[in-house]
Amino acid sequence: MPESAQPETPILVSPAAPESPVTFPPAFLWGAATSAYQIEGAVREDGRTPSIWDTFSHTPGKTAGGETGDIAVDHYHRYREDVAMMADLGLTAYRFSVSWSRVQPTGRGPAVQVGLDFYRRLVDELLQHGITPAITLYHWDLPQELEDAGGWPERDTAYRFAEYAQIVGEALGDRVEHWITLNEPWCSAFLGYGSGVHAPGRTDPAASLRAAHHLNLAHGLGTSALRSVMPTRNEVAISLNSSVVRPLSQDPADVAAARKIDDLANGVFHGPILHGAYPKSLFEATRSVTDWSYVQDGDLEVIHQPLNALGLNYYTPTLVSAADPKLGGPRADGHGASEHSPWPASADVAFHQTPGDRTEMGWSVDPSGLHELIMRYTREAPGLPIYITENGAAYDDKPAADGTVHDPERIAYLRGHLAAVRRAITDGADVRGYFLWSLMDNFEWAYGYEKRFGAVYVDYTTLERTPKSSARWYERAARTGVLPEVDAR
């Protein structure tokens, strides 16, 4: 206001009211997640045979530094110590995967009981500590013998998965209520058979689409197999790494590019799983790659099993535009949209770096994308409970001189994304739990041991575990149901 209009006495301004605490429902599950090949090690013990990731990681040039999961973080021998650590961190749930080739070394036939016994002991240990187990049946580690027979592009692999699901369901269904058939089938299909940057390392766009369909079929057959041998109270879900695909602009060409990638990233899985049909636009976009003749009568009914819950994995959004024809369709982030792109028939789409702070993976930090994703699936499948089955970030964590590991960036990441989850609950989403990725540093696939996603630091020489600041921050959230401030340790 003009100086002449100012009051003669100063106005006393009260301090800004503190933000309302971000609180979660009492029954909300506070979990962490891992996968078998990334943490177990013991790859040649008790009858276990190679999976595609054993073969891939031992192939020169496929992983950073030629690193493998042979030892990983030795969870197979240290699971009791690890479960005690989970309890100390206040976790109420733990999501882990079963190694298929530890249970069925050839991917077919009877189970190796000593392999199942490991998971029986792990489940018993979790329950004794009051931690809810959540099993993922498949986290990318197909038995090598099944890949030798054709892998996921072959229909028979889906039937082998159903047999495996029944074996594990019979062994553990009396004590484990939360089941996930597949983790991120998009990665299995398109990174494994399209771009070849994941096991088994094939670069065949048509094979990647066949793999996607047979993974969907495996989910449906596996769901039926689980329900045939487990109590009706048990939940069966699938974990999708559905992309939040945003157009660079509202130009019709950019919007069309986003629609195409949404079909290839999301519709190819949630279409048949949630709605019983593939998007017609997906067929149109991929007609130059495949004729989809492998979709047989009755497949969609098998795939479209009623789910008890949906798992969503989220890390960062995807930003796309129509490609510049002068550049021949290269991706804007430097990864060529060619025969080695994970996106079949997407040479006319350009991918752009999303804005914002970045993690060590180069992924932008954008909690709004998680809220957007949750609300999308709340609309796609009204009434279906949701679990965030993966969310987290890699940072360049290093121990201080006193041995502590402080990771304030990860705390900020977790708080922002958990606040987005709480906002979605307020907006009507039925989100029942959150599993941070990951419990501890581990073998990060083709990145070897370069990228640390863990809330617990692992010294890869001694395998000593040290909870980072973020682990203690998450412990406070889990024990109180309230998000601490970012600077809390």
Image (spheres, rainbow, N blue to C red):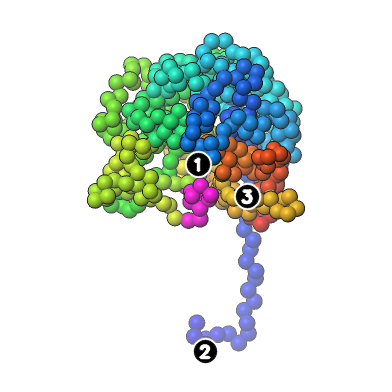
Could you tell me residue 417's position as x and y percent? 55, 48
Q: What type of secondary structure mainly makes up the magenta span?
A: loop
Q: In the rendering, which numbered label is found on residue 479? A: none
Instruction: Look at the image and tell me whether residue 481 can be seen.
Output: no
Q: Residue at x 60, y 53 (%)?
A: 409
Query: SS class of the residue under badge 1?
Result: loop
**Up-down: is 138 above or below 406?**
above
Q: Residue at x 49, y 85 (%)?
A: 2
Query: SS class of the residue under badge 2?
Result: helix
Question: Are there few (<14), some (14-19), or many (20+) residues within 10 Å of tag 1?
Answer: many
Say whether disc 3 or disc 2 marks the residue closer to the N-terminus. Answer: 2
Amino acid bearing label 3: Asp
Task: Answer with the quarter of the image where residue 453 lies.
Answer: top right
Which residue is under mark 2? 4
Magenta-span inclusion, residue 368: yes
Q: Residue at x 67, y 31 (%)?
A: 74
Nearer to us of marks 1 and 3 is 3
Amino acid bearing label 2: Ser
Say whether disc 1 or disc 3 marks the residue closer to the N-terminus. Answer: 1
Which residue is under mark 1? 314
